[in-house]
Image: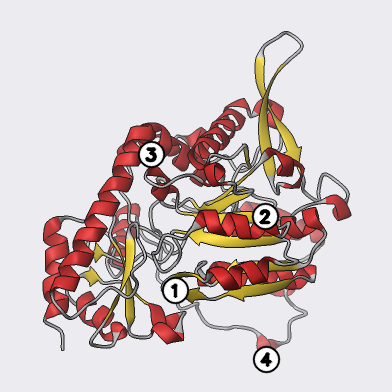
Amino acid sequence: MDYIPHTDRDRRRMMDAIGVKSIDELFADIPEQVKFKRRLEIPEGMSELEVYNLLYGLSKKNANLNDVVCFLGAGAYDHYVPATVDHVTSRSELYTAYTPYQPEISQAVLQIIYEYQTAICELTGMDVANASHYDGATATAEAGIISCMHTGRKKIAVSAGVHPEYRATLKAYAHGYGADVVEVPCAGGVTDAKNLAAAAAGAACVIVQNPNFLGCIEDVVAAEKAAHAEGALYAVVVDPISLGVLKPPGEYGADMAVGEGQALGNPISFGGPYLGIFAVKEALVRRIPGRVIGMTTDNRGQRGFVMTLQTREQHIRREKATSNICSNEALCAVAALVYMSTMGKQGIKEVGELCLDKAHYAAARLEATGKYPLAFKAPFFKEFAVRCPVDPEKIVSELCKDGILAGYPLGRAYPELKDCLLMAVTEKRTREQIDRLVARMEGLK
């Protein structure tokens, strides 16, 4: 198959039209000494079968999560994706659609996004969700910025237990907005309560993550009181799977719930694309960035879906725009919706319980070796940190040779925790895999 659309006749006609006789004459203005005069070092054309074999061979150079056993979390998690997710999202009308620029003729896409928003609201206990964000980091950063816009303050208090890359993104956003970001340190794996209360004074918002990046479950009620006592908004970064077993942010007074939605039916794939969750209480609906899809009836009484709010600078005055986020993660949001619909309330609860049980089994087995005590005493969900008798980087490197991704060395982001390894255990891990991990780590010197 020839993928070059122009024939010799096409090229001849174009050259005739501009009055040149050859390709060389067309590029006559380029000095001879700088012209490239040899063949490009690229292979000859291949058949479809040859291309398939070549690309398959290249792909085998990368390990995927079917080849290795993954205990690596730190923001991206190896959860099971039901076959229905790929089946639905592979439909061409969904797979190829970008953004509904003509919403009146994109009713199916709008309905799907509306139902995604509804599912996120039910999961988080919030009133309104947008049509998704780029990822958890940008969703967190936007929460900080809109709190500044809403309160008129320019200080954001964020727990050091929030994902380090989310905090870095928040600082980048805040710098452009002229706001200060104050980090509240952790003590014993959770946000230091006294420092949080002090940092909340004069802040536009207080941001905590639950469970936090260290795997620990925060005292979210105390954080809520600290924020609202000082007139600050309260934003919580959530792991959506944890909401199968933990109380949702809407039930303990959060004004905003944000987070990474990759765990909801989106596979780990070279770092993306991911899905930012963004949900708020109704009082903040006019501040919400991106798009909000609503349901209405037309002049014949028929149900229809519309873009209710678009606080984008393309549609409203720039100074009134809440965000430069222009693209939602529609296909990832569709995957999340199909996942949540397939699992249902009971399914998400069961996934959460499996993660909880298996993570605690792994932690207990490691502690029982006498070599890997838990780094923190705080309760945890599916991630936990252990202190290591050998360099965590060495553990990761050695176990990788056996096809085990052991975890995330916390010293990369928290120098004071350089002897700690953060490990994640999802519902996919088996007892045999956990026991193999423990045996392998126990034997390291």
* Identity of the residue drawn at 50% across and 78% down: 39
Name the amino acid type tagged 1: Ile
Q: Mark 2 or mark 3, which is nearer to you?
A: 2
**Which mark is drawn over residue 42?**
1
Residues tagged 1 and 3 counted as in contact (Cβ below 8 A): no
Residues tagged 4 and 3 counted as in contact (Cβ below 8 A): no
User: Residue 156 placed where, x, y %?
Assistant: 69, 67
Name the amino acid type tagged 3: Val
Q: Earlier in the sequence, mark 4 or mark 2?
A: 4
Instruction: Using the image as rendered, state which of residue 310 and residue 189 is in the foreground.
Output: 189
Report the Cα–Cα distance between label 2 and label 3.
Answer: 40 Å
Q: Which of marks 1 and 2 is nearer the N terminus?
A: 1
Instruction: Using the image as rendered, state which of residue 243 and residue 185 is in the foreground.
Output: 185
User: Residue 34 placed where, x, y %?
Assistant: 67, 88
* Identity of the residue drawn at 11% across and 73% down: 439
Q: Which residue is under mark 4?
A: 33
Q: Which of marks 4 and 3 is nearer the N terminus?
A: 4
Name the amino acid type tagged 4: Gln
**Which mark is drawn over residue 109?**
none
> Is disc 4 surrounded by few (<14), some (14 to 19) or many (20+) residues within 10 Å?
few
**Which mark is drawn over residue 228?**
2
The C terminus - image quarter: bottom left
User: Residue 214 placed where, x, y %?
Assistant: 41, 69
Q: Is residue 262 left or right of residue 154?
A: left
- Secondary structure at badge 2 equals helix
Q: Which of marks 1 and 3 is nearer the N terminus?
A: 1
Name the amino acid type tagged 2: His
Q: Which residue is under mark 3?
A: 85
**Could you tell me if residue 273 is visible in this image?**
no
- Secondary structure at badge 1 equals loop
Report the Cα–Cα distance between label 1 and label 3.
Answer: 38 Å
Report the Cα–Cα distance between label 1 and label 2.
Answer: 63 Å
